Image: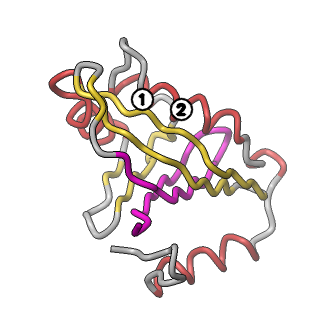
Amino acid sequence: MENIAQGHVSRRAALAGLALIAAPAAAADAADPKAIGDFLALWSAPDVTGAKLAAFMTEDGEFRYERKAPVVGRAALIAAFDGYLAGGKRYRMEPIETHAKGPVVLQYRHETPLTNGTPGHTETIAGIFILAAGRIKIWENFLVAA
């Protein structure tokens, strides 16, 4: 588990973050925090589907969470997102802080699972989004320890 609150992150995450900040950004890949907000808000919509969520991502997009294997590609993303939504589960994602530079959006948020409208345990998440051609190329989440 990444402990961002106490300043502890994996070497891989730290190096990736440094590379992203230092990399020059193409104008076409400029981060759009509103698009990220729309994507995250969709997770709580009653009619959300894996396909609707995956449409925000590139064809070869990646979703990464902690130490789990990355989910790569549109078909795999749809299946994974549908799995998260199974049984009427939705996710309320409330931004705390959002920062954008070049093709990168960093977001600190509260995330609460909702099963048939009943809220579960809220967690604090740090998310990194890398955009390409106006879509999410990489989405990586880190659980922030309380």
| Type of amino acid at the residue the image marks with label 1 | Trp
Residue 22 seen by the camera: yes
User: Which residue in the protein does label 2 denote?
Assistant: 39
Residue ID at (61%, 74%):
17
**Is mark 1 in CB contact (under 8 Å) with mark 2?**
yes
Front-most of 93 and 85? Answer: 93
What count of labels does the image hold?
A: 2
Left or right: 114, with 101 as reference point: left
- Please tell me how crowded label 1 is: few (under 14), some (14-19), or many (20+) other residues with Cα within 10 Å: many
22 vs 43: above or below: below
User: Which residue in the protein does label 1 denote?
Assistant: 43
Residue ID at (54%, 82%):
7
47 vs 4: above or below: above
| Type of amino acid at the residue the image marks with label 2 | Phe
Front-most of 101 and 94? Answer: 94
- Specify the segment rendered in magenta: 122-146
Membership of 144 in magenta stretch:
yes
User: Where, by quadrant of the figure, is residue 21 drawn?
Assistant: bottom right
- In terms of secondary structure, what is the magenta stretch mainly? strand
Q: Position of residue 69 (x, y in %)?
A: 26, 63
